[in-house]
Amino acid sequence: MAAVLPATKVAFRPAVGTRLMAGPAPTAGFERIDDHQRRLGARPAGGAALIDVIEQSGLRGRGGAWFPTWRKWAAVAKSSDGRSVVVVNASEGEPLSAKDRTLVTLRPHLVLDGAVLAAETLGANDIVVYLSRGSRTTERALEQALKERSGARLREPPIRVVRTAHRYIAGESSAVVNRGSGGLSKPRFSLRRSAEKGINDQPTLIQNAETLAHVAMIARYGSAWFRKLGTEASPGTALMTVCGNVGRPGVYEVDLGAQLGGVIEAAGGTVSPAPGALLGGYFGTWLDPSWLDGLPLDVDRLRTTYKTAFGCGVLAVLPQGACGVVEATRVLTYLAAETSGQCGPCVNGLGALSEAMERIAASEATFTDIDHVRRWMEMVRGRGACHHPDGAVGQLASALTVFNDHLRAHLNGQRCYGTAVAGFPQPPSPGRGWQ
């Protein structure tokens, strides 16, 4: 496994063969523009050839869906008539993730370089940084970075900040378009992709902050450099937020050719025997403890062989004594409260599932509760205005499989000590408002 970088004590390796935040100068904390340019050199120019370089690199979006980055860029370029928008999606509504706000706080100019490269390549006349209202430290770092870029008189399109509600689904692409156009941070029905008709009806590239940071490095060092780590199908590195039952929780940059056990070891190992873990965040998959050592990080192998996903790069490890059924129920209850209230599968389906699972988690289930849960999960799949109900029931379904012994104990009315154990950082209070 390649060197792993804790976000709280950022280390930098030599530029050759390194990754996202590479450079010769060991520094930590907010990086000012002079230090950024001294470390990495001036930002190269964007252009149509950059799309080919990104395609050759194999870079995929790091927001969770892992869609090939070059395809997004090519779609916007095809639709644009000289007026388009580039969005840096740094909203990070996933409660367990800290990678994007850590990156924007520590290395804002790297992310902004990537956004400007995208704008120059696609002919965009508007760059939007889409930021949650719940991240004040990140907002201050971004404000400082924008002042520095203005003072340096860089030749680049104007960059503006759009603040959004601190809600789980506020970062969904149609919600970004809605909010960026002056509306609420809610998903909306649309027959056209944002690449064709996005913010203010202009073709819009919506790209996760980490993805754009990778672009800024690939533009400097090339596609072959990027492929020196990772696998053929999943090249490069990714930022992971590791929390819960580990010695050193934090944000780590990991080689996608590595295994999950190496990540846990780099994070200080488990403090106590782990009964399982959640990979990918609240829309992720629960893992049996036997998988925690040898599970590959290769995105395609995770999906095809192990039926799981890297997602937004969260690994939350349960401590000894925690109950996966209880934790999955807490996640489900939070997600049910985060619905935007626009369709039945979310409002009614997730609400009913949450109520039934709360009875099960409390070992107070009625005779038909688990049958209802299994049937309702299938009823809400694929039927929402967005993928919110799919993600919510996906994590629940995996928990009911992985923690089947716990489930049987709850259904038999046995007392569960996991209700008193904090498995990992608990879901926050549901958000308020959509602006």
Image: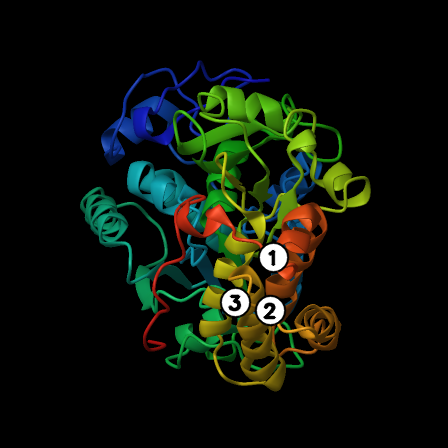
Residue 389 lies left or right of residue 211; in this view the side is right
Mark closest to the chain's N terminus, 2 or 3: 3
Residue at the right extreme, as displayed: 305
Mark 3 or 1: the one toward you: 1
Query: Label 3's element?
Result: helix
Q: Position of residue 401 (x, y in %)?
A: 72, 51
Q: Position of residue 50 (x, y in %)?
A: 59, 42
**Identity of the amino acid at label 3?**
Glu
Mark sitting on residue 410 = 1
Find disc 3 in the rendering and name its residue: 358
- Density class for disc 2 (Cα within 10 Å; few <14, some 14-19, many ≥20) is some
With respect to residue 240, does 199 lie above or below?
below
Mark 2–mark 1 Cα distance, whole angstroms, equals: 8 Å
Find disc 2 in the rendering and name its residue: 365
State the quadrant of the C terminus.
bottom left
Mark 2–mark 3 Cα distance, whole angstroms, equals: 8 Å
Mark closest to the chain's N terminus, 2 or 1: 2
Query: Label 2's element?
Result: loop
Q: Foreground residue, 309 or 117?
A: 309
- Density class for disc 3 (Cα within 10 Å; few <14, some 14-19, many ≥20) is some
With respect to residue 55, does 384 lie above or below?
below
